Image (cartoon, rainbow, N blue to C red):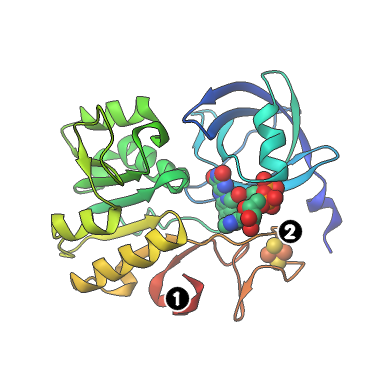
Amino acid sequence: MATIELVPEPAMIKKVIQESRDVKSYVLKLDKSRKIAARPGQFVEVSVQGFGEATFAVTRTSKDGSDFTISVKRMGHLTKMLHRAVRGDMVGVRGPYGNSFPVDAWKGKDIVIIGGGIGLAPLRPIIDHILQHREDYGKLEIIFGARTPEDILYKEDLGIWENDETIQLHTTIDVPFEGWNGRVGVVPVVVKDLALKPDSRVAVVCGPPIMIKFTVAALRELKWSDDRIYTTLEMKMQCGIGQCGRCNIGEKFICKDGPVFSLDQIPEHAL
Ligand SMILES: Cc1cc2nc3c(=O)[nH]c(=O)nc-3n(C[C@H](O)[C@H](O)[C@H](O)COP(=O)(O)OP(=O)(O)OC[C@H]3O[C@@H](n4cnc5c(N)ncnc54)[C@H](O)[C@@H]3O)c2cc1C
Ligand code: FES
């Protein structure tokens, strides 16, 4: 095994952002001032000494690559420890790893981003990339679903996207909620209501497995072909570099050949 690649680099938490009741974002800076050049869709392995390691999408990189952001949903052992971390604390980082969304191949196309909950984290760099190279892409439509208004992430970005005339943003919550005057309904239903036409567009879907499954079904019903629907797969990982065999689907390793795939590249059971 390539042990050198498995040694985490120390990184300092520069900033903690409480995004929602159970999601916090962390702006991290590598201790040795190594710049990080994560492509949209890539992930890092983040460790807390004595508590282990977990996988997180790089959800934003600063322009000069001197720092980067991860968003962490509180789930179990490691993420609970991370949620206790404060500015100035140190964590370990390996990566970035994995393939990335083929944003260059998508030039000239209209893009539909469909995120559910923390699933928006790996998709935000695509939106950042398109906004930084706006003239290279067609229309940008974003559908973001959260369980309740209290689960909505990236409120500042959503405000910016809402006011951007080149973006069509649809934010929805799962069920009615006191004080919420916006759209209500789960993401797959919104996709059907909007009757999203495939035309020459590309759709990128990420969220909880049930949301992905029904959103993909809705897109297929609307005659989207599998080569135009992309997702990023989640599976408990260990090495992150294709060495331990923990994350394979058939002959493919999610950590190395993925995590980004178009649906025609993976078996149905991988969703
Ligand atoms: C490529 C990739 C990118 C990811 N990006 C993010 C991200 O940006 N933000 C984020 O918050 N999480 C992300 N995850 C998921 C994250 O890695 C897990 O939630 C984390 O490992 C949980 O660690 P834990 O020790 O806190 O929980 P554990 O104690 O390991 O697990 C707690 C519970 O969560 C479940 N669980 C753990 N990992 C996963 C998983 N991968 N998928 C579904 N259920 C799981 C377990 O079955 C258990 O029920 C990503 C995973 C992958 C593979
Ligand atoms: S996590 Fe080890 S092979 Fe993918």
Numbered-mark total: 2
Q: Residue at x 47, y 43 (%)?
A: 121
Query: Gap in Å between the C-alphas at discs 1 and 2?
Result: 23 Å
| Res. 236 image quadrant | bottom right
Near-viewer residue (230 or 116):
116
Taking the image as drawn, is residue 38 in sight? no
The yes-or-no answer for disc 2 within 8 Å of ligand 2 is yes
Q: How far from the left and from the top, in percent, is residue 8?
A: 79, 42
Q: Residue at x 68, y 37 (%)?
A: 80
- Image quarter for ligand 2 equals bottom right
Marker disc for residue 265? 1
> Which numbered circle lies on residue 238?
2
Mark linked to residue 145: none
88 vs 197, left or right, is right
Q: Is residue 121 left or right of residue 192?
A: right
Residue placed most toward the observer, 51 or 239: 51
Task: Residue 252: name its quadrant.
Answer: bottom right
Q: Secondary structure at mark 2?
A: loop
The residue drawn where x is 37% and y is 57% is 205
Residue drawn at (36%, 38%) of the image: 148
Report the amino acid beneath label 2.
Gln
Which of pointers 1 and 2 lies earlier in the amino acid sequence? 2
